Amino acid sequence: MRRRVIIVAALALVILFGVIAARVAFEEWRTIATTSVTVRFEVTTEYRIGFALGTGDIAFGKVNPGGGGSRKATLAAAEPAIAVIRLPSDLAEMIRVDQNLVRLDPGTPVDVTFDLAVPEDARPGNYTGEITVTYLRRLPWE
């Protein structure tokens, strides 16, 4: 009898964990918006400091090999959402973001920092890519 109780309890736990795992695995997320922003910079051997003001881009200006910089962007949403940030794959070795997955609550903007680190052996020239931000919301709506 005791053995049967243990087996039934174990089976109940397995079913409970299965239900929880299925709920998490099959929870539906919907894309509510996607936006892209251009990231750009010029690698140069001229010793200049570069920056850009008043653009919708994430612009680092002119950067020497071995140099870098940081730029901040602010994300916000009118409804609860998750922002997924994807960096351009061709610039992945030079650009980093401090958080790729950002929880957004209404009325609470979140700053995200993009860091540029140009390798010493980078070729001079203009570099451009697209950063994509996808906003997701879980169904049923929270």
Image (cartoon, rainbow, N blue to C red):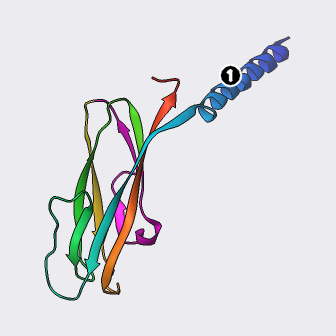
Percent from the top left, x then y, of residue 93? 41, 71
The relative height of residue 57 versus residue 77 in the rendered view (above or below) is below
70 over 46 or under it: above or below: above
Q: Nearer the viewer, residue 73 or 65?
A: 73
Does residue 104 lie above or below 112 as drawn? above
The quadrant the N terminus occupies is top right
Element at label 1: helix
Q: Position of residue 127 (x, y in %)?
A: 34, 75
Query: Residue 120 appears at what percent x and percent y?
Result: 31, 84
Residue at 24% over, 77% down: 67
Magenta stretch: give its range: 85-106
Residue 18 in percent (x, y) is at 70, 28
In the rendered image, which residue does mark 1 sit on?
16
Q: Quadrant of residue 114?
A: bottom left
Q: Quadrant of residue 32?
A: top left
Kind of residue at badge 1: Leu
> Which of these two is toward me, 28 or 4?
28
